[in-house]
Image: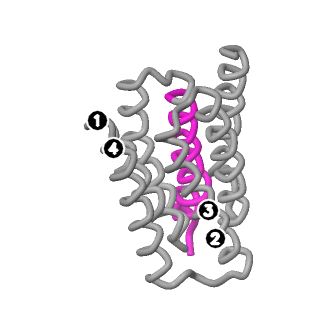
Amino acid sequence: MNNIILILGIIFSIVSLATFLFKDKFIILTWFLIANVIILIQYLLTDCIVECLIVAASIIKTVVFMIYAKLQIKPNLYVVIIFEVLMLVCGIIVWSSWFSLLFLIASMISTYASWQDDLLLMKILYAISSVFYIINYICTGLYTNIIAEVGIMLSAIIGIIIYDVNKRKTKV
């Protein structure tokens, strides 16, 4: 069982590296959906029911935002508020320690980031949420997930450099 969990963590890390290497929001969210499904399976196998609830809510959120991205419309403010409240309620329900607050903050930042149409802001917010996830994973001992979050952070930074910094350096 531990080998399966380790392999899932490695796959999660590899998938995480690909998240922001694309310019299309739908594709970025598709990679996040794949990563969330992998981590949900990992949490189920480790009996981390607390985290399963928040990740399941994240999967629902990602699918909804993927639909909006595919239709090329921005979800209205009420949609993001509903998902932020859902994350908050999940966080309160599954509260186990102050480390849960880090996971909750990260989840709420990534929810707000998923709602953004501005991919630069989305990447910056996901990089910030990764810091909170990394601290949480250090405290809870989920070391393969630390690697995955570092991958997301690196992917966001690389995506910013490739698609935003280089684009802004070109003369108009």
Residue 104 lies in the magenta-colored region: no
**In the image, residue 106 lies at what x, y percent?**
40, 49
Q: Is 122 left, or right, of 31 in this rendering?
A: left
Packing grade of label 4 (10 A; few <14, some 14-19, many >=20) is some
Q: Which colour scheme is used?
A: one colour
Q: Which of marks 3 and 4 is nearer the N terminus?
A: 3
Residue 152 lies in the magenta-colored region: yes
Q: Which mark is residue 95?
A: 4
Q: Residue at x 62, y 35 (%)?
A: 44
Give the spatial CA distance, label 2 vs label 3: 6 Å
Packing grade of label 2 (10 A; few <14, some 14-19, many >=20) is some
Mark whose residue sits in front, 1 or 2: 1
> The C terminus is located in which quarter?
bottom right
Q: Which of 5 and 123 is in front in this view?
A: 5
Q: What segment is highlighted magenta in the picture?
A: 146-172
Give the spatial CA distance, label 4 vs label 2: 25 Å
Q: Residue 64 carries which label?
A: 2
Give the spatial CA distance, label 3 vs label 4: 20 Å
Q: Which of marks 1 and 2 is nearer the N terminus?
A: 2
The residue that label 1 is drawn on is 97
Q: Are marks 2 and 3 in contact (CB under 8 Å)?
A: yes
Q: In the rendered structure, which amino acid carries the disc numbered 2?
A: Val
Mark whose residue sits in front, 4 or 2: 4
Q: In the rendered structure, which amino acid carries the disc numbered 4?
A: Trp
SS type, badge 1: loop
**In the image, residue 107 lies at what x, y percent?**
44, 52
Query: 101 above or below 80?
Result: above
Q: Are marks 1 and 4 in contact (CB under 8 Å)?
A: yes
Please identify the quarter of the rendering in which residue 43 is found: top right
SS type, badge 3: helix
